[in-house]
Image (cartoon, grey):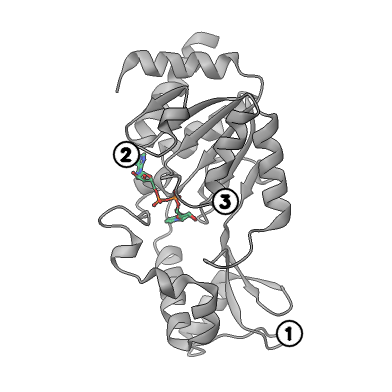
Amino acid sequence: MNQQDIEKAAQMILAAREVVVFTGAGVSTESGIPDFRSPDGIWSRYDPEDFTIQRFIASKEARKRNWRLREELIAANYQPNPAHIAIADLERMGKLRCVITQNIDGLHQAAGNSPDRVIEIHGTIKFAKCLECDKRFPITDVLQRIKNGDEDPHCEVCGGLLKAATISFGEAMPQKEMYEAEKASRECDLFIVIGSSLVVYPAAQLPIIAKRSGAKLIIVNFTPTDQDSMADLVLHGKAGEVMSAILEKVREKVS
Ligand code: NAD
């Protein structure tokens, strides 16, 4: 970790009026949740095609594999790591406008971010939704039904197909969340990307919107991204270590 970069990031946070944090799967790998695209990521064990809305609707076998991944993620009872805690600290310091997350794991709220400051643009694994009537059910209830032998659960209200309340490939992005995410990206003066490969659009458009609207951009990621050349500061390292070091530096400077 380059100490000059940590110092620079801390100064940028202190100088900012309103920070937006944008997170991807890489913020949660230190909690034990694999990302999609790393060599041991989720796509090394599951077929991404099964996670298209079209395949989910068409194939009972794909739905069963889909529920198996949900079951795996819920059963593991993942906990926030130092990167989530550092982001929650930004809110406690009064610096954070919101966290825009592509993650579905709920770990920002578990770390202490207020639910109304977490914009989940790819949905949440905490609920299942009916694809017909939109009614939501706690995912643990639906997984229990599966455990009890209902291997292809349908809505108890209208009989429609149930699916985890996450956004599948080919499914429309949630309008309200995308509106709020774009607005926050336009209005903030510091945008921090943490743990995202920035290849999934339209989510990856948000740092571009922020930068074009005049915000400074920091990218914290293991590996280079296509947007590194646009950033004011790029830190290649583990999100937990980098974010803890930055927040420690911020605290040092305000005390
Ligand atoms: P991605 O898998 O495309 O990219 C993750 C990036 O994080 C990679 O560039 C990797 O180098 C980096 N990374 C991994 N571990 C890191 C660490 N400890 N510190 C810093 N960087 C690290 O993920 P993405 O950009 O979020 O986009 C793909 C989709 O993945 C999103 O839609 C998201 O919904 C979904 N996803 C979410 C979870 C979750 O909720 N935890 C898990 C897997 C995938």
- Could you give the CA–CA distance between mark 2 and mark 3, rounded to whole angstroms? 20 Å
Closest to the camera, between mark 1 and mark 2, is: 2
Is residue 110 in sight in this rendering? Answer: no
- Hey, what amino acid is under mark 2? Thr
Q: Are marks 1 and 2 in contact (CB under 8 Å)?
A: no
- Residue under the point 25% across and 55% down: 39
Q: Residues within 10 Å of mark 3 (few under 14, many from 20)?
A: few
Quadrant hosting residue 2: top left
Q: Are marks 3 and 1 in contact (CB under 8 Å)?
A: no
- Residue under the point 49% across and 87% down: 148
Tell me: residue 157, above or below residue 138. Answer: below
Q: Nearer the viewer, residue 65 or 70?
A: 65
Quadrant holding the N terminus: top left
Give the residue at mark 3. Answer: 202
Q: Dot 2 lies on which element? A: loop
> Which mark, residue 223?
2
Q: Position of residue 182 (x, y in %)?
A: 67, 42
Tell me: residue 237, above or below residue 9. Answer: below
Q: Position of residue 164 (x, y in %)?
A: 56, 70
Give the residue at mark 1. Answer: 157
Q: Position of residue 74 (x, y in %)?
A: 46, 64
Q: Are marks 2 and 3 in contact (CB under 8 Å)?
A: no
- Hey, what amino acid is under mark 1? Val
Quick one: label 3 or label 1, which is nearer the N terminus?
A: 1
- Hey, what amino acid is under mark 3? Pro
Closest to the camera, between mark 2 and mark 3, is: 3
